[in-house]
Image: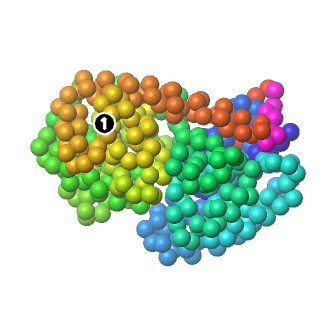
Amino acid sequence: MSRVVFFLQGKRVPAARFRGVAIARGLAARGFEVDLRTAVPSVYGDWGSAGRWPGLRTLLGPLALVSRLTQLGDVRSGDIVFFQRPMVELPTAWLERRVLAGRAGPRSLFDFDDAIYLNPGTRRKFHRIVQMVDWVVAGNRSLAEAAGVPHKTRIIPTAVDTARWTRQPPRDATGRQVVVGWTGLSSNYGQLATAAAPIARVLDRTGARFVLISDAPPPGDLACLRPELVRWRADREVEDLARLDIGVMPLPDTPYARGKCAFKLIQYMALGRAAVASAVGVNTEVVDDGVNGFLARGPGDWEASLTALIEDASLRARLGDRARARVEARYALDAVIPAYAEILEALGGRPHTTGDAAPTGGGCP
């Protein structure tokens, strides 16, 4: 019986939780034996100060490398290795090469959901890993094209567990009672800032409130939103996000932003919330403009869409219902686990017939 060994990027970072831990749990429910391993310190996402001070993040990198070395001793040649992004944030692919040395047959896949190939320090490393592994799983078409190995690449979007991310009843509120909001890591506040001015103008006119769900207070360039900060907590993420009546996902139109997988947008929609998002990258695939949300191509679109949603509770409810249906069809965990299972079976993995396997290792809280 093949064991699937997940090398996860972190414990709290969204990519590790939703493209690592959640996938492992889904595969375990289908009978696969899975083993989750996270470096300590897991630099990206788990250390808030490291995200704000790149120098500290660089210093922690070698410690993560030492931690990774302790996780390699019992990785067998018969195991299937699941790299959730690179193993450490260092420019070398030596660790991945060491793990894969002596593999008997196809036994590895590399999963990524961000434009990490645009980072000058890891560009060559990214392409080395892509060449080394047997399968590449990309979060969207832009990322898949960047990998440059279409013969062994599969696109699987980031998904949510719709049994946990349930549809929330819409609120019959307008004007000052409406809550507009954004969720994400504080390192991504710059994305929100690209549409802060038109959003602020709508808030001023309508009196609607703005809530930020993040790990740190916002910078001064977001003060125009007069935001209420809700500190992100894993045990309350659904309840806190359900406070929003409207979710927003601004993005600049850059190569890096076009690699984003629209995950915060998917989270809003899973809860049955109407959303407005920049018409950038995969956002245009997740949202049908005017059907299950709105796409904004400039300040005027942001103002018109948000104003309409704030003033019309029935419009929010209709779009929210369709948004939830879109997530159930394309972006639910149940919709993507079969695709991962197919890849593992192609790599020689076979689930237990009883389907009662469970994740092991420190990466599954």
Residue 28 visible from this viewpoint: no
Name the chief secondary structure element in magenta.
Answer: loop
SS for dot 1? strand
Quarter containing the N terminus = top right
Q: How is the image coloured?
A: rainbow
Residue 211 visible from this viewpoint: yes
Query: What residue is rendered at 64% in x and 47% in y?
Result: 150
Q: Quadrant of residue 349?
A: top right
Instruction: Give the image location of residue 134, x and y in percent.
Output: 75, 50
* Residue 30 lies in the magenta-colored region: no
* Circle 1 crowding by C-alpha within 10 Å: few under 14, some 14–19, many from 20: many
Instruction: Give the image location of residue 140, x and y in percent.
Output: 53, 45
Instruction: Give the image location of residue 113, x and y in percent.
Output: 55, 50
Give 355 or 295, whichever is nearer the viewer: 295
Query: What residue is rendered at 29% in x and 56% in y?
Result: 194
Q: Which residue is mark 1?
A: 294
Instruction: Give the image location of residue 332, x and y in percent.
Output: 53, 32
Residues rendered magenta in the picture: 347-353
Would residue 347 be found to the left or right of residue 162 on screen?
right
Would residue 129 be found to the left or right of residue 330 on screen?
right
Query: What residue is rendered at 79% in x and 42% in y?
Result: 347
Would residue 178 be found to the left or right of residue 126 on screen?
left
Query: What residue is rendered at 28% in x and 46% in y?
Result: 297
- Which kind of residue does numbered mark 1 sit on? Phe
Q: Quadrant of residue 325?
A: top left
292 versus 21 height, above or below: above
